[in-house]
C-alpha cells in the first residue's frame, strides 16, 4: 500500500519535462522555444503600445520602432552567445564548421545581448520617428520583462539551463537520455527549475514596475533603469548559486555572474542619475517635452524635442524677468517724476527785490 501511495505521490513531487521540443509540419520544424519567444514579443508589443498610448504617444509607433529593435536584438542575442557564453564551440582549430556561429536555428542565444543591442535598435528607431527615447524606454520596459518571463519557458521544452540537484518538491525532471543531463549525476536526479524561478521573478518585477508607475513615483528614465537593476539582481542570484551548465570563466567566476553584476551597477547608477536630473529640471521649473513629434513636420529629432521645450521655458523665464525689470524701472521713474512735481508745487515762487 505504501509503495502504491509513493508511486502515486511521486509525480506530484517533481516537475516533468516535455518529451518533445518541436512540431514537425511537413518540411518545417517549429521549435517550442521559438514559440515561447514569439509569444513574449507579442505580449511585449501589446503592453508597450498600451502604455505608450497612455503616455500621449501613438500606439502604432511601438510597432514601427520594433522593426528596428527586434532584428538588432536577434543579432545581439546570437553575438552574446557566440562571443561570451560559448566561444570555444565556434572559434579555434578544433571547430569543424567555421560558419556554425551563423546557424542561429541550431540554438544558442543570450537574453543580455538581445536586450542591450535591441535597445540600440530602439534608440535609432526613436530618432527616426521623432520619439523621446527615455519616455519610450519607460513605456516598454515592463513589457520586455514580461517577454522574458514567457521566453524562459523555452528552456523547459529544451531541458536546458537548469540548476543544481535538489530534493525539493518542485525539482525538475531531466531525461537521462538528454544531451543536457549532467553525466556526473545518476538517472532520476531532480534539479532546480531555474527557468521557473526566473519566470516568476520577472512576473513579480512586471507587477512592481506597473504598480510604481501607477503611483507616479518614478521619474523620466527611472522605469528603464529599475528594470535593468531588478533583472540583474535576479539573474545574479541564479548565476551565482544555482546554474551548473557550462560557461566561460573569468577569474574563477562564471562570466554571466560578471555581466549580471554589471547590470545591477548600471541599473542603480542610471536610476540615481535619472532621478537627480528630473529633480534638477523640476527645481528649475522646466516642463517635460512631448513624448512624440512628427519628424517630417517639425524637422526635429526626438532628442531635440525636450531641449527645445527647455529652451522655450528658459526664454519665457527670461522674458518674464526682463518684463519685471522694465516694470520696476518704469515705476521708479513715475515715482521720481511725481515726487519732483510735488516738490515744485509746494515751493514758493521767487520775487524780484529792489
Image (spheres, rainbow, N blue to C red):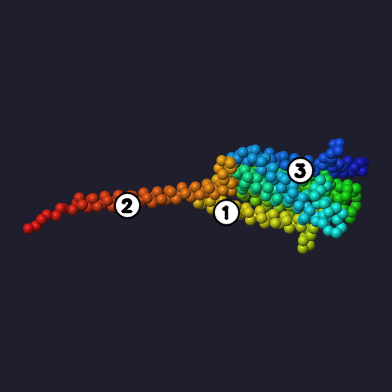
Q: Secondary structure at mark 3?
A: helix
Q: Which of the two labelled residues, at mark 2 and mark 1, occupies the earlier sequence position? A: 1
* Quadrant housing the N terminus: top right
Q: Residues within 10 Å of mark 3 (few under 14, many from 20)?
A: some
CA distance for labels 2 and 1: 41 Å
Residue at the disc numbered 2: 332
Q: Secondary structure at mark 2?
A: helix
Q: Give the farthest residue toward the top.
A: 26
Residue at point 49% right, 47% down?
312
- Judge from the rendering whether residue 152 lies leftward or rightward of residue 322; answer left or right: right
Q: Give the farthest residue toward the bottom.
A: 251
Answer yes or no: is residue 13 visible. Answer: no
Q: Check if mark 2's residue and mark 1's residue have beta carbons within 8 Å.
A: no
Answer yes or no: is residue 252 visible. Answer: yes
Quadrant hosting residue 34: top right
Residue at the disc numbered 1: 276
Amino acid at each position: 500500500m505504501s509503495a502504491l501511495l509513493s508511486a502515486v505521490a511521486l509525480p506530484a513531487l517533481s516537475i516533468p519535462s516535455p518529451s518533445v521540443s518541436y512540431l514537425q509540419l511537413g518540411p518545417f520544424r517549429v521549435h517550442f522555444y521559438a514559440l515561447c519567444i514569439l509569444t513574449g514579443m507579442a505580449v511585449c508589443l501589446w503592453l508597450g503600445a498600451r502604455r505608450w498610448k497612455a503616455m500621449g504617444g501613438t500606439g502604432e509607433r511601438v510597432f514601427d520602432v520594433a522593426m528596428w529593435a527586434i532584428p538588432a536584438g536577434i543579432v545581439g542575442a546570437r553575438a552574446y552567445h557566440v562571443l561570451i557564453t560559448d566561444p570555444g564551440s565556434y572559434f579555434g582549430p578544433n571547430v569543424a564548421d567555421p560558419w556554425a556561429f551563423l546557424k542561429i536555428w541550431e540554438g544558442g542565444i543570450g537574453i543580455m545581448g538581445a536586450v542591450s543591442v535591441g535597445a540600440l535598435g530602439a534608440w535609432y528607431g526613436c530618432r527616426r520617428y521623432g520619439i523621446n527615447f527615455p519616455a519610450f524606454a519607460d513605456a516598454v520596459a515592463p513589457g520586455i520583462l514580461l517577454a522574458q518571463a514567457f521566453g524562459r519557458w523555452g528552456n523547459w521544452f529544451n531541458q536546458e539551463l537548469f540548476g543544481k540537484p535538489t530534493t525539493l518538491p518542485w525539482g525538475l525532471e531531466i531525461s537521462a537520455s538528454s544531451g543536457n543531463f549532467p553525466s556526473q549525476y545518476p538517472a532520476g536526479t531532480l534539479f532546480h527549475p531555474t527557468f521557473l524561478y526566473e519566470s516568476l521573478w520577472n512576473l513579480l518585477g512586471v507587477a512592481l514596475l506597473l504598480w510604481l508607475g501607477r503611483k507616479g513615483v518614478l521619474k523620466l528614465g527611472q522605469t528603464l533603469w529599475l528594470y535593468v537593476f531588478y533583472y540583474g539582481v535576479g539573474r545574479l542570484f541564479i548565476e551565482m548559486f544555482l546554474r551548473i551548465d557550462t560557461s566561460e570563466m573569468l577569474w574563477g567566476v562564471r562570466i554571466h555572474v560578471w555581466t549580471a553584476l554589471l547590470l545591477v551597477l548600471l541599473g542603480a547608477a542610471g536610476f540615481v542619475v535619472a532621478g537627480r536630473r528630473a529633480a534638477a529640471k523640476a527645481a528649475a521649473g522646466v516642463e517635460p517635452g512631448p513624448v512624440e513629434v512628427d519628424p517630417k513636420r517639425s524637422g526635429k529629432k526626438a532628442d531635440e524635442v525636450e531641449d527645445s521645450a527647455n529652451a522655450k521655458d528658459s526664454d519665457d523665464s527670461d522674458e518674464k524677468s526682463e518684463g519685471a525689470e522694465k516694470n520696476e524701472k518704469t515705476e521708479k521713474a513715475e515715482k521720481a517724476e511725481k515726487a519732483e512735481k510735488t516738490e515744485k508745487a509746494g515751493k514758493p515762487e521767487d520775487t524780484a527785490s529792489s
